[in-house]
Image: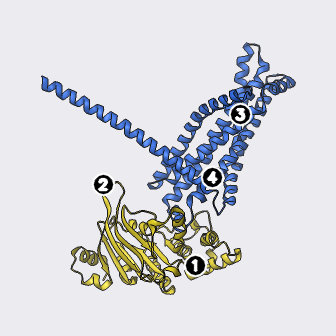
Amino acid sequence: MSSQFSKEKYAIVLDDVKKTFDEKEFVLKGINLKIPRGSLTAIIGFSGTGKSVVLKHMLGLYKPTSGSVTVLGTDLSTLSSDNLTMFRCNYGVLFQSAALFDDMTVLENVCFPLEEHRRNLTKDQVLQIAQEKLRMVDLDPKHFHKLPSQISGGMQKRTGLARALALDPEILLYDEPTTGLDPILTEMVDDLILQTHRARPGTTSIMVSHDLNAAFRIADFIVMLDAGRVLLAGTADDFYKTDIELVRKFVDKGIKH
Amino acid sequence: MSQQKSGFIQSIANAMDYVAYSVLNGFLNFVHEVGSFCLFGFQSFRLLFTKPYRYGEIIKHMEFIGNQSVGIIALTSAFTGLALSFQIYLGFKTLNATDLVGPLVALAISRELGPVLTGLIVAARAGGAMAARLGTMRVNEQLDALDVMGVNTKQYLIGPRIIAAIFCMPLLTALFDFMAMVGSWFLCTKLVGLDHAVFMSKIKDAVQIHHIIEGLAKSAIFGIFFAVICTYKGYNTTGGAKGVGEATNRGVVISMVSIIIIDYFLMNIIRIFYVFTGISQ
């Protein structure tokens, strides 16, 4: 599937996406967005502006009320439920809470997607790949056989990222990866995202965050949402130079000089 | 005066509108919920027959629903048999019909109390755990993680639990029936001094194999209901830890009430079946 769409310039295209949950108020009021293939894009904005809803549309977890979401050249609305499930193998997602399976060890968590989708691999091969992914995110092997509850928040994020990388996805999504972490851990996770992105050329990474520092430091492309609309999309320079008052306010308050 | 009268009529009309709206809305919500519930159960069941097959998950849940319920079922059933037998013994003693205690207890246990009480106990123990587990997975984003990993959550998490409940419930009911009769036998022959041979022969005369099968079949249906209700509530949990608590509570309560209501309808269906097939009731 990946080679079929390799010519596409944009990994994800949202075309006039509108979303309402109660048929009264629109959470998304016409999002137009093109995420360049191979870029590291940050989606930022105040709380409640629809960042996570946009992310869930990209994943096909939500269907737009109107408009379309095209991922790697495929309009998600044309996929049946079963095909959409299979299509999601193109994604790797690091959740805010890491979302590790609490009844599995660290290693089993990373083995799980491989066991589900790479059934031609032997058990030893699965273990080898999982260990390689865990080493890639700098997790000490002494933690491999621990349960998620027995390791720290930072290690859980690393494990979550290793699991997201297990199937070598074309698109990596990070849903508020640093929310609730201390500044040192935040920087570590940001570096990990950047390092992972650089180590995998061609992979499109999308980070949803309200951490402006991280967005400006690591992202190639930044999208700011406000009240269900794209307020500004561009590079960090575009954000510094803009005259849009709300963006200026957000940048001035959010950036630690 | 007439203005006052028309105002009064208007307020009554408004109140009636409100009542009619509330009733209709409640009914529509109920229909929607039942429809979603049926669709959820059907989809989960259908997906079990698509690849990859989840034998390992089915065995794991059978161990949880079945094996881990053995102790509690054995204990409660033995004491149910003891208590029921003693009450019936006291009543029949006044009629000088104590020989009938055994058959009456056997029929009541195998046809009604066995499946119903097993259903209630397992719904509370395993059903509650299912709802809580799935609810926690939902609020901790683990279900979303499975979805985005390309794993069909209904096939992986729901279907195996339903199948496990269908297989385990008749086995647990058989255990309940057996242990309740052991309790009844102990009370009748060892505590109140009824004759062992009479106790056994009267049971053999009264209880037919279809009475036992009837109870086991009912228990399998109770298994479908509590498994689908509890997984449905857990799967659709919203709102953090409070939501998990509410989902678990609702799942267990609705399952228990449903088992008792469904039992009545199943009893009538089985009666009609006996009439049509000519099997003695």
Gap in angstroms between the C-alphas marked 4 and 1: 34 Å
Q: Are marks 2 and 4 on the same chain?
A: no
Q: Residue beneath label 3, please?
A: B79
Q: Secondary structure at mark 2?
A: loop
- Judging from the image, mark 2 belongs to the subunit labelled A
The colour of chain A is yellow
Q: Are marks 2 and 3 in contact (CB under 8 Å)?
A: no
Relative height, residue A196 to residue A93 (above, below): below
Quadrant in the rendering for residue A179? bottom left
Q: Which chain is blue?
A: B
In the rendered image, which quarter contains the N terminus of chain A?
Answer: bottom right
Q: Which of the two discs, 4 and 3, labels the residue nearer the N terminus?
A: 3
Could you confirm whether marks 4 and 3 are on the same chain? yes
Of the image marks 1 and 2, the number of the one nearer the N terminus? 2
Relative to A207, is B257 on the left or the right?
right
Q: Is residue A204 visible?
A: yes
- Closest to the camera, between mark 2 and mark 3, is 2
Residue B208: numbered disc? none
Image coordinates for residue A15, horizontal then vertical, percent: 35, 71
The local crowd at label 3, few if under 14, some if 14 to 19, many if 20 or more residues have their Cα within 10 Å, is some
**In which chain is the residue bearing label 3?**
B
Res. B161 mark:
4
Instruction: Identify which residue is drawn at 42% across, 62% down.
Output: A63
Amino acid type of the residue that numbered disc 4 sits on in the rendered structure: Arg
**Which of the numbered marks, if any, corresponds to residue A139?**
1
- What distance separates the C-alpha of mark 1 from that of mark 2? 47 Å
SS under mark 3: helix
- Asked whether residue A255 is in view, the answer is no
Q: Chain of mark 1?
A: A
Quadrant location of the C terminus of chain A in the rendered image: bottom left
Q: Is residue B89 left or right of residue A27?
A: right
